[in-house]
Amino acid sequence: MHLPENSNLDIATCQAWLCPNLKIHWQILSVSDSGQVLLQAIKTEQNFLFSGTQGYALKHFDGTLTVKQVQEKCQQEFGEEIEPTFIIQLLKKLSDLRVLSIPKKNEIQKLNAEKTTKNIKLYRLKSTVQWIRHTDEYWLLRLQNTDNIAYVQVSNYDRNLILQLGKLPVENIVDTYKINAQYLQELLQNLAVKGMLEGIETPKVPKKFSIFKILFFKFRLFNPDNWLNCNIKNFRFIFTTEFCFLLCMFLGFTTVLAFSKQERIYNLGQELWSSQGSSLIIPFVLLMMLVVSIHELGHAFTLKHYKGVVLDIGIMFICLFPGAYTNTTDAYGLVKRRQRTLVMAAGVICQVVIWGIALCLWSISTPGNWFYTATYLLMLAAQFTLALNLNPLNKFDGYYLVEAITGINHLRKRSFAYYAQLWRREPSLERTEDIGIIAVYAPACLLYITWLLVNLFFWIWHLYTPYFPVN
């Protein structure tokens, strides 16, 4: 921040100045038993006393806010006590104390000349980026590459800023829309990370070690999109009203059957475990892999039915248990909420159908033979993976189903961001009808993670306690 030597400052011009970042060389300390603050140099013994209102303003001198924005914050905090030129007078005081440097008139002219003659860089969206109107509140930007699909969700206000990128330089957009320069930079960074800006390579995000990378990781195998295009015609009947009616009747019948045999199902599980024990683990895991693979195909074919693109299929490991996965990111681009919900629910529906078929086959099979045991294990595998998938606190189908049903994309991120805004006493930008779900989700996640960690600790404790020496 530089102040001109002329004391007759043009207030309109000063309003657009960016307040300097004093925190690089100075720290603000409260003076006990008074409303004053001390501006203390970090590397020297210099210090200056300021009033409480001036101290409040100085705390916002972080290099991101303009004079006008800091003035508005002070007026909101202190009301009519703040004069219209309060921040300008504070800047003049800082310059008199030599906290801020004052360039000479010829230096200012030279800087202005360099600014007007330098090359102006315009950011532009790639021509392949598509705009998708999702709701009245926000838009989606979609970019499809040969092996990836990327989405960015933006508000109507952000869309207007992005549309100006190819027309105006960043500085002019900031001045025109009277926004924080850092806000626009963060928006540009989000677009760059997704590879949506021309001439800017997608920045590589440094890989950080996390325990969750051990518990969950995956390997891409191939692009299934062409295969799905060739075979979707064989599964179109699944999406007809007649088939859905028959499916509901079948699931209703199997539910009644399960309740009538629940005691037998429970007792058989205990008998098998006591008689065969750990020998059941391998066939059970293999059947889980089968269930998860059919589950993922359900997602893929449903997305393909709605003209979506599936560019990725592979193998994932959850707690070292293997299974298949498909990349259904393109479901975000489906405009109708019902279609997005069906894509997310397709895998769960497949699991329920597998469970029902296994239950029926087990019910009519002869007790004691291999088929009787295999169908029972298949039923349990479908039931276990269904319970795991439907938990909305894990980022599996239950979580994405909640997102699709409510229309709240990035629910977990927005929920924790909501509490961060409350902590900073900032107004929330969330819709009133969404706040209830957003406010509940983050605490529920924390409680769930705490519960998991406590149970994991006690499980490890009981596992290794027999090996500890006892005095």
Image (spheres, rainbow, N blue to C red):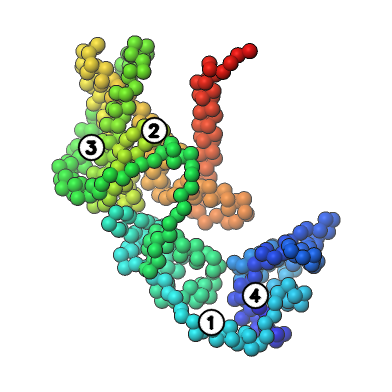
Mark 4 vs mark 1, CA separation in Å: 15 Å
Q: Between disc 2 and disc 1, whose residue precedes?
A: 1
How many C-alpha atoms fall within 10 Å of the one at disc 2: few (<14), some, or many (≥20)? few
Dot placed on the residue nearer the N-terminal end, 4 or 2:
4
Looking at the rendered structure, the secondary structure element under dot 3 is helix
Q: Nearer the viewer, mark 3 or mark 1?
A: 1
> Label 4: which residue?
1
- Outermost residue to the right: 33
Q: Quadrant of the C terminus?
A: top right
User: Of the residues shown, which amino acid type is indicated by label 4?
Assistant: Met
Q: Is residue 68 above or below residue 33?
A: below
The residue nearer to you, when weighing 299 against 426, is 299
Find disc 3 in the rendering and name its residue.
244
Mark 1 = which residue? 115
Percent position (x, y) of residue 60?
66, 64
Do the residues under discs 2 and 1 have CB atoms within 8 angstroms? Answer: no
Which numbered disc covers residue 320? 2
Q: Nearer the viewer, mark 4 or mark 2?
A: 2
Dot 1 lies on which element? helix
Disc on the earlier residue, 3 or 4: 4
